[in-house]
Image (tube, grey):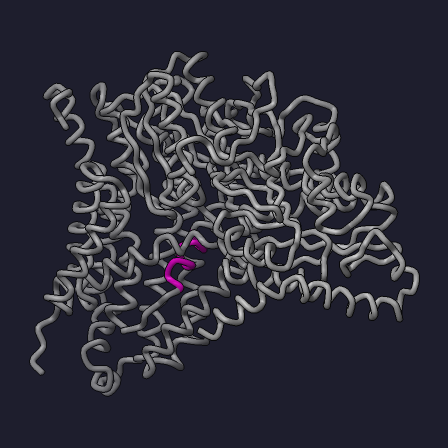
Amino acid sequence: MFADYSWTELGSIFAMQGFAGLILFSVFVLMALGLAIIFGQMGVINMAHGEFMILGAYVTYLCSNIVETYIPSLFGIYFFFAMALAFVAAGALGALVEWSLIRHLYKRPLDTLLATWGLSLILQQAYRSIFGAREVGVSLPNWLLGSVPLTDIIEIPINGIFVMVLTLVIAIGVYFILFRSRMGMQTRAVVQNRVMAGAVGINTEKVDRHTFALGCGIAGIAGSAFTMIGSTGPTAGQLYIVDTFLIVVFGGAASLLGTIASSFAISQAQSTMEFFLSGSMAKVLTLLTVVGILMLRPEGLFSLKIRR
Amino acid sequence: MKRLKDLIDHRLSRRSVLSGTAAAAMLATASTFAPAFADDVNTTGLAVTDDTVKVGILHSVTGTMAISETGSVQAEKLAIEQINAMGGVLGRKIEYIQEDGASDWPTFAEKAKKLLVNDKVAAVFGCWTSASRKAVLPVFEQYNGMLYYPTFYEGLEQSPNVIYTGQEATQQIIAGIDWVAKEKGAKSFYLLGSDYIWPRTSNKIARKHIEKLGLKVVGEEYYPLGHTQFNSVINKIKLKKPDVIYAIVVGGSNVAFYKQLKAAGIDMTKEKPLLLTISVTEDEIRGIGGENIEGAYAAMKYFQSLDNENNAEFVKSFKEMWGDDIVIGDVTQAAYLGPWLWKAAVEKAGSFDIDKVRLASPGIELTTAPEGYVRVHENHHLWSKTRIGLAKPDGQYELVYETTDLMEPDPFPEGYQ
């Protein structure tokens, strides 16, 4: 299939394809990080994860409209405020949901699945009533659009670079929060032994709320960033939820490193196969491989070794 | 097993059941609305009184398809309001009963049955996806209803109980490909679509026509519905360097596809490659963003920007009823035709009876259609012109070409039966 092309062309295409894989990897990590925190650290299956992402997207949409109408001079950099606001809004909603719904269901994991599924339907209909059933268009500053041409064929999409940098920043941020801060230490303590953590004076309810809010907030940032590459509509969150769960489960639920490794494996497999096969076939093969590996390693790629 | 048997019994006794219900309904009507009893405009017990007639509107206003179907509901309500303002149909005001298909195909079938059996509506305007149409089709055929279906679709269907007011695949595809081949000198095509029946059938028709013209298809790809990552296929397109990207991507994927195409440095305004789509109307552009699709071409029968008196009037009344910031796409206009075509058929037949309306339908013409002139073909599809529009950054299409003649609908093109 490559006979018709020159070596430079092939080299360029493989470079581009590698880059496409890296962008997909960043997108997956960004999608899955929030869910991994909630699922991995708290054991809550949050089916409304996609809707928290879309909340972030709608916040971005509102920001872009407000800034464009009232303070157009700041339009070039509004995206950073929008992401911060998306984090706050999704985090606040997350805290509210945890307080009103999730905390009553901690001992009933299957019920949280149903409750958050219901929540996702409620949120979808709420978006539909507020913003209308049609998709909305988020206008972006010009510097985020287009690409940087390196050679004739190799062109690097700017929004791809932006997502990659953002993912890196957030991953490092999450690492510091969970492994280098007081809050993170408390969170890990609660995960390891809730009763004992409570006994040494950690307010476990507060820790739960903060963890849940953090996960939702990161989903909000992800949704905000995805306005650059995807659609913003009441049900757009559903487009992400399957891939997100796949990544978290494949990576091993309790391990953030696993989430990153599984994002990398799935994104590279997917983008390489998409290049050689058709899109639908690539998806089928990726899913089959994941199912196969999960049959051999039900606990996922990375798992905590626990003596039982 | 029992279900099956019931179904067969039901089918066998359809005629007797129908006349039975009709008689019962007439008895019921007789006691309350004595004049309607003798009325010969309605011999089968439809919900018609001396001054009203009931019709159904069946679209999704909740769920994932609400994005697309909202426009159709608005257009149908506008047409009904206008018809009523003109004095209604056969002197009767139209009252509509709206049901929500909720983007769920079994729900569509259930609601269709409710409209036909309980409400006894004289016509139904509704459905959007082919899946929902396929789900209601047996219901309409069993209970002998009349459905006006607005969406452009893949063809390969012709039911006595459906009038298709959108274009079927050959009408949309052939004119578009002829145009890029002749006017733009296109030699090679890359076919791309979402993975389900409409894009696949359409691309099959497109490929056949492209090869008939002696041109080349250099790639054909399908992505699952809802797919959001198109970087790999964009790289393949860059490698193959086709003259035309022929895109039939739908739904949320559309937004991702055009944003990523632009981000990957494919500037459609340079027409190298040129992009031709049959799935992006003005409605979809709102989600995609005009700046992301500027320079693409679309082949369909209607654009909001069409410059004629009918359309100016239509756009004005649509905005008066539904707000200034609304956009009108191809399907919305086709949905608007439904009530008007039905009115014309009923008046030609002089009766609301489904069988008489069906017989009267072929040959019905509308000179007041926003798209211009349309006529109903014997195969229940519409003769209509196909037009090419160029996407502008403000989210509207600029008309660059229209066929001189009406395109004949051909739902069963050779080689597809």
Q: Quadrant for the N terminus of chain B, please.
A: bottom left
Q: Residue at x 53, y 67 (%)?
A: B7
Q: Nearer the viewer, residue B37 or A210?
A: B37
Q: Quadrant for the C terminus of chain B, please.
A: top left
Magenta stretch bounds: A48-56
Q: Main structural element of the magenta stretch: helix, strand or loop?
A: helix
Question: For this view, does B275 lie left or right of residue B133?
Answer: left
At which x and y percent is residue A170? Answer: 27, 52
Rendered image quadrant of residue B368: top right
- Taking A120 as reference, is A156 above or below it? above
Q: Nearer the viewer, residue B256 or A277?
A: A277
Rendered image quadrant of residue B269: top left
At which x and y percent is residue A179? Answer: 18, 64
At which x and y percent is residue A234? Answer: 49, 53
Q: Is residue A54 magenta?
A: yes
At which x and y percent is residue A28? Answer: 26, 51
Q: Nearer the viewer, residue B76 or A213?
A: B76
Number of numbered tags placed on the structure image? 0
- Taking A28 as reference, is A298 above or below it? below
Rendered image quadrant of residue A191: bottom left
Asked if residue A122 can be seen in this view, the reply is yes
Question: For this view, does A289 lie left or right of residue B312?
Answer: left
Q: Residue at x 88, y 60 (%)?
A: B36
